[in-house]
Image (cartoon, rainbow, N blue to C red):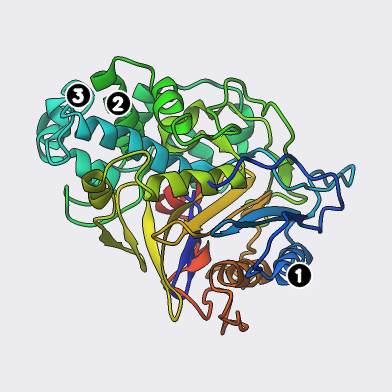
Amino acid sequence: MRIIRFVGTVVGTTLLLTATAPVAQADARPATKASELPLTSETLDRAALDTGLRAVHDAGMYGIYSSVRDGAQRWTGAAGVADVDTGRPVRPGMLHRVGSVSKAFTSVALLQQVERGRVRLDAPIGDYLPDLVPGERGREITVRMLLNHTSGIGDYVIGAFPSLAHNSTASLDENRFRSIGPEELVRLGLAAPATGKPGEKWSYSNTNYVIAGLLLEKVTGQDAAGYITRHVIARAGLHHTSFPRTPYIQGPHARMYDSFYGLINPPRDYSDYDMSWAYTAGAIVSTTDDLNRFYRALLGGKLIGPAALHEMQRTVPADGMDYGLGIYAIDIPGCGRFWGHDGAVFGAGTLVYSSPDGKRQVAMGWNLMKYERLKSDGSGFEPSPIDDALNRQVVRALCPTTTPAPPADSRSVTAPTRTVLPAVDLSPEAWATALR
């Protein structure tokens, strides 16, 4: 999963890796048209939102779908194709692998245990899982450090898919239906080079949230996915959100493609995948409507109380954003602060942002990943018009009075402090963020 950044904002790819009114059903009308609700006082510019999605598709994205909220008003739309072979169009309401957006769900579940007195945020993880994280690390790394990515623990992605270190997807293709246990993922993460001393700095690692899931199981005595389903997903009123039980998504969804920065041409279909490798760090499947509903429930105090939410929103500096406990904040000049997360798995990208009061929201999902192209000299990546179009659409959705003017380059928007799409490279360290 990775983080995308506006010049002032973020959307990304971390290896996982990678809410609102009742969820709308998939729209049967043309893919570039929005599903509309009868409204009295209209503040959503539906035509502009439709046009913005089409611009993302025209820039090269296969398919994209989105939900925007402004108070009681809702817009949903889609543009492009769900299947490049058949030309089947994408539709609003399609199921989607949301990658690291899952981390907010896991964090909420653990904060519920903090409220019950079963977990202390500043207690060493070794107090709870001494055999999983033994020795000095277990004594120095706290639960909070896991949730805000300051533990210094490396990521397991290269260990699970070693060919990535050599810019090859062979290990992905050979193991897409392999089931891998969370304890093995943690072992691989602990064996990876440390990214710093505990508490020293922010460094994104999916291993942190696998450990968090195992901690949740330890203190509740329940399967982590089952607990999150009952106490977070159901409590938020999400009807199209789940942990996948098979490598195949059950329900209407787009095919999900990955180009691996031009190394795979044409992009390969990664729709079907055993998501055990993502576990509580990024395995959830959801819809854009459900993601907005989740954030409204979270920020509205329906999932955790004010004190726990305050802890969740205590942030550390993190590459142009402020990262809390499974959520982060972006600031859009002239528009305000928004909370959310992004996610990326093989073939699927996601973002969701919400104003602090939950009234203004955007969620988007798209089905082509790592579309950036390497420069001929190997020094980095060519600017992508997809990045520009995504950034503009985020600003258009969240800040209706702000004109999303063309950015100076594909890594900066006239809005927040990060880009919607990630700055990427192919180093082993970068894969944790590219699959989040």
Q: Residue at x 62, y 42 (%)?
A: 287
Percent x, y of residue 217: 31, 21
Extreme residue toward the right, this view: 86
Front label number (1 vs 2): 1
Secondary element type, mark 3 = loop
- Which numbered disc, 3 or 2, marks the residue closer to the eye? 2
- Please state the horizontal and vertical placement of residue 15, each as a whole percent of the image: 48, 44
Name the secondary structure under disc 1: helix
Q: Nearer the viewer, mark 3 or mark 1?
A: 1
Q: Amino acid at mark 2?
A: Leu
In the rendered view, does 152 fall on the left or right side of 404?
A: left
Which residue is located at x 70 percent, y 67 percent?
49
Residue 129: assigned label: 3
Instruction: Please state which of residues 340 and 369 is positioned toward the viewer in this rendering.
Output: 340
Please tell me how crowded label 1 is: few (under 14), some (14-19), or many (20+) other residues with Cα within 10 Å.
Answer: few
Mark 3 or 2, nearer chain start: 3
- Earlier along the polypeptide chain: callout 1 or callout 2? 1
Q: Which residue is mark 1?
A: 47
Q: Which residue is mark 2?
A: 216
Q: Amino acid at mark 3?
A: Leu
Element marked by disc 2: helix
- Residue 281 at x, y percent in the picture: 42, 37
Q: Residue 55: in sight, yes or no?
A: yes
CA gap, disc 3 and disc 2: 11 Å
In the rendered structure, which amino acid carries the disc numbered 1? Ala
